[in-house]
Amino acid sequence: MDWDDELDARGLLCPLPVLRARRRLMTLPPGRVLRLLTDDPAALVDVPHFCAEAGHALLAAESVDHPAHAWLIRRDQGTKPPVT
């Protein structure tokens, strides 16, 4: 699968990979895909949780160059109502 942007968050510990992913996703137009690279074990829980809470679609997750993981995240379509 193709992606529109990539963020290498290897070497960063929780919560930095998710915080940086959130910041990068906000720079992308809705529907675009970010490839996120992490090697923090906490990312296995944090990234799916972040996507579910923020309304982004987690398209794929795979182990690459152990212990790193690559995540494909599609930015939300902008249809989720704002949290009040």
Image: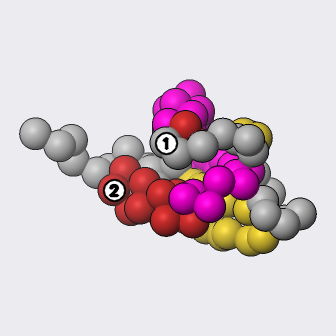
Query: Residue under circle 2?
Result: 53
* Vertical placement of residue 53 versus 4, above or below: below
Q: Quadrant of residue 73?
A: bottom right
Residue occupying the far left of the picture: 84
* Vertical placement of residue 76 versus 62, above or below: above
Tag 1, which secondary structure? loop
Tell me where the magenta segment starts and ends, as one range: 19-43
Circle 1: is it few (<14), some (14-19), or many (20+) Cα within 10 Å? Answer: few
The quadrant of the picture occupied by the N terminus is bottom right
Q: Tally the numbered discs.
A: 2
The quadrant of the picture occupied by the C terminus is top left
* Amino acid type for the residue under numbered disc 1: Pro
Circle 2: is it few (<14), some (14-19), or many (20+) Cα within 10 Å? Answer: few
> Residue 75, percent across and down?
52, 48
Q: Residue at x 78, y 59 (%)?
A: 68
Residue 3 is a magenta residue: no
Query: Residue under circle 1?
Result: 15
* Vertical placement of residue 24 versus 38, above or below: above
Tag 2, which secondary structure? helix
* Vertical placement of residue 22 versus 39, above or below: above
> Residue 57, percent across and down?
50, 62
The CA distance from mark 1 to mark 2 is 15 Å
Q: Is residue 1 visible?
A: no
The one nearer the camera, 78 or 48, is: 48
* Amino acid type for the residue under numbered disc 2: Glu
Q: Is residue 12 visible?
A: yes
Q: Quadrant of residue 82?
A: top left
